[in-house]
């Protein structure tokens, strides 16, 4: 199971390629040969880089939706629109699709953020803006994590 961590500053070259940082390469060592799928995020102005196996699992979940229900098809269409398979080139670079780069207006300075089983791709300025948004983290944690009750995370000792 992947647990991608870290924030990485990268810069796109003139052809729209980025070098995958060594910290992410190490975490993704078993996944690199299978490639990735990159797509728009459905909630935020960023892209999401999925290791191919993670994308396959997500696709299987989408495949269980009844495609004769209009809202299901609308979601599938919007979620998968623009999804593009990527592979590292011989220099460890990923070529980001131009069509996806324009939506969140990424620019040349990017922030890659490990987020469990995927990597978010933000413009550096967009990431900073998101981090500065006022959020009542205590209330959010209670709402989101409170439903888990008193379950202990593996490795926690209390």
Image (spheres, rainbow, N blue to C red):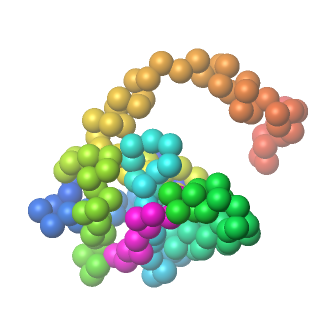
What residue do we see at 56% from left, 69% from top? 55
Give the answer, above or below, for where 88 lies relative to 49.
below
Magenta region, residue range: 79-88
Q: Position of residue 3 (x, y in %)?
A: 59, 56
Q: Is residue 148 left or right of residue 48?
A: right
What residue do we see at 31% from left, 50% from top? 103
Q: How many marks?
A: 0
Q: Is residue 141 visible?
A: yes
Q: Is residue 14 left or right of residue 112?
A: left
Q: Is residue 112 visible?
A: no
Dividing the image into 4 quarters, which one contains the N terminus? bottom right
Q: Position of residue 42 (x, y in %)?
A: 50, 49
Q: Which residue of the protein is positioned furthest toward the right in this rendering?
A: 150
Residue 80 on the magenta segment: yes
Dividing the image into 4 quarters, which one contains the C terminus? top right
Q: Is residue 139 left or right of residue 32?
A: right
Give the answer, above or below, for where 12 lies relative to 86.
above
Residue 85 or 103: which is nearer the viewer? 103
What residue do we see at 36% from left, 37% from top? 127
Residue 5 on the magenta segment: no
Residue 154 or 117: which is nearer the viewer? 117
Q: Is residue 65 left or right of residue 108?
A: right
What residue do we see at 20% from left, 57% from top? 12
């Amino acid at each position: 199971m992947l647990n991608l961590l870290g924030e990485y500053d990268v810069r796109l070259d003139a052809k729209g390629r980025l070098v995958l940082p060594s910290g992410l390469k190490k975490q993704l060592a078993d996944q690199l040969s299978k490639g990735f799928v990159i797509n728009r995020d459905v909630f935020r102005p960023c892209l999401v880089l999925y290791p191919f196996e993670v994308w396959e699992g997500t696709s299987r979940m989408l495949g269980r939706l009844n495609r004769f229900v209009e809202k299901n098809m609308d979601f599938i269409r919007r979620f998968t629109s623009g999804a593009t398979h990527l592979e590292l080139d011989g220099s460890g670079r990923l070529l980001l699709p131009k069509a996806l780069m324009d939506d969140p207006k990424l620019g040349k300075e990017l922030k890659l953020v490990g987020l469990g089983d995927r990597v978010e791709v933000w413009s550096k300025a967009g990431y900073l803006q998101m981090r500065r948004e006022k959020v009542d983290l205590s209330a959010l944690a209670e709402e989101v994590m409170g439903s888990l009750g008193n379950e202990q995370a593996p490795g926690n000792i209390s």
